[in-house]
Amino acid sequence: MLTITSLFENTVAKYPDRLALVCGDARFTYAQWDARVRGLAQALFDLGVRQTDRVAIFQKTSDATATAYLACQLLGAIAVPMNYRLSANEAVFIIRDAGARVLIYDDSMQPVVVKIEQGLPDLRIYVRVTGHASPGDEPDHYDAPSHHHDFDALIDGTRHRDAPLPPLKPDDISALVYTSGTTGRPKGAIHTHGNDVAIATNCVMEYSLTSTDSALHIAPLYHVGGMQAYFMPHLMVGAANIVLPRYDPQRTLAAIAHYRVTTLFAVPTQIQDMLFHPSFTQTDHSSLRMITTGGAAIPAAAMQRVIDEFCPNVYNGYGMTEASLTLLLHPRDALSRLGSCGKPTLISTCRVVTNDPDRAVPSTESVERGEVGQLIVRGPQLARAYWNNPGETARRFRDGWLYTGDLFSVDEGGYFHFRGRADDMIVSGGENIYPREVEEVLYHCPGVQEAAVIGVPDAKWGQAVTAFVVRSDAQLTEDAIIAFCKASDDLAPYKRPKKVLFLERLPLNPSGKVLRRELAASVDQNLLRTGT
């Protein structure tokens, strides 16, 4: 059966001379990239890394990120990809929780790494990636200690030796992918080789990927959406992978034109950034055959523009660290089912069951069509468990199902509609309010570009519905939005926002999900400016 190692080997054997990886001035065919991956795997072995050892990858996105990840897979080590925006204490928590023996880091992150080293005196193997800093991020001169090894020097020193490749099985662990921690401490989802091959196969089939595709990677590769559900599927078919170290709308548009990109994964905010950028109409994006997105809603008017002017085929997906791509809305339904997450993917079984935090709801207790409940998922893509967290594992993984904690309803056509996280539900005056249903009304209000809703503590109501809005029309006022909600037939009076606050941008995690805790904190600290 396939593992990530055999998947990679198959592609290299079939397409040795095909362009595999591009990042800045670095360009590698599959044969050249294979040599780099094997060289790094051998170097890690020489440093004492063995099968099942954890290797933390704390890098900004580059060709080195993908090389390090694949080297771990070939060696049988367990990759621990980390968000490069983490603070030193947050990074120390993950490295310690994972029990990592090695930290591979970007040299531009040296100030944070110094603090990490102070917090982890027993971690003695560091690998420093140099020469990948984005303009403006170049590090100060730093004389690294002797136990900090240079990434490229390690590869060059072992290029002509064969890395030891242990026999791997589909149920061997490939990675610990930590959740974003939007509801508490990050949890390490245990991904196996079998899980990740299933995810890649699923995406290849759903998106009809082929070796002639050219993928642009602007999503971070420490995230399931960037690596397992986008990079690995393109690697599986022998496509070209163009990596941008930092997302910027103008550079992204230029890369699409220059490399004749055919597939793009971008969160809705990024799509709208590009769509409304002054250089949009001056750049050629006719090569794009597919855009896939997810994490938030796209207003109907913007979606129509995306289809008409950017790319005719837009896929809207739903997934999570523990299950990757699970629901998918295909281009044929992009406008007629706008706001829906589509239907289960080819390898996914999904149900919506009663949401009851006080008991373990069985998988058979499904709600009626149109009713809101908790989404549960089953399939070969599910993570095995949470690393070092038996309590959360028992709560979320039950009888072969993942209890997602996300609230959904299913309409008469079988399309799934995201209603919010169970933890985000607002209780106002004794009534349950799901943020998504308020947000969907707000997105129809003229002048609203983005919107998010939370419950703010209130002496009278318990929680008051509070809306955060990013305006496309600077003249839009709080009174106008509240009046629009009052006039809407889709919003009961008790669900209407009591307050509207304006932001330049919503706080989002890398997958495009709104960080509601940051919104709540900003209210508590009185940091927002309100509209008049």
Image (cartoon, rainbow, N blue to C red):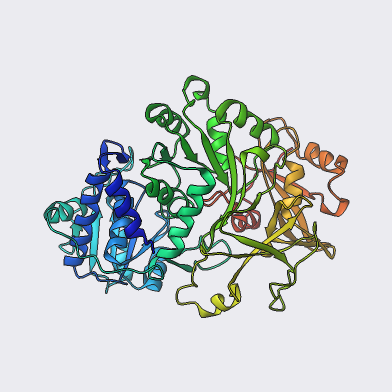
Give the percent coordinates (x, y) of residue 73.
32, 61
Q: Is residue 50 left or right of residue 528?
A: left
Q: Nearer the viewer, residue 120 or 335?
A: 335
> Where 67 sits versus 55, above or below?
above
Give the percent coordinates (x, y) of residue 119.
33, 70
Res 462 seen here: no
Give the percent coordinates (x, y) of residue 151.
21, 54
- Residue shown at 51%/53% (left/top)? 202
Quarter of the view holding residue 475:
top right
Quarter of the view holding residue 101:
bottom left
Q: Is residue 73 left or right of residue 361?
A: left
Could you tell me how many numbered marks the image carries?
0
Give the percent coordinates (x, y) of residue 79.
35, 63
Q: Nearer the viewer, residue 247 or 400?
A: 400
Res 308 seen here: yes
Pick the quarter of the image with the C terminus. Answer: top right
Q: Is residue 472 left or right of residue 479?
A: left
* Residue with the most extreme top position: 282
- Residue shown at 32%/59% (left/top)? 5
- Residue shown at 36%/49% (left/top)? 60
> Where 477 sits versus 281, above or below?
below
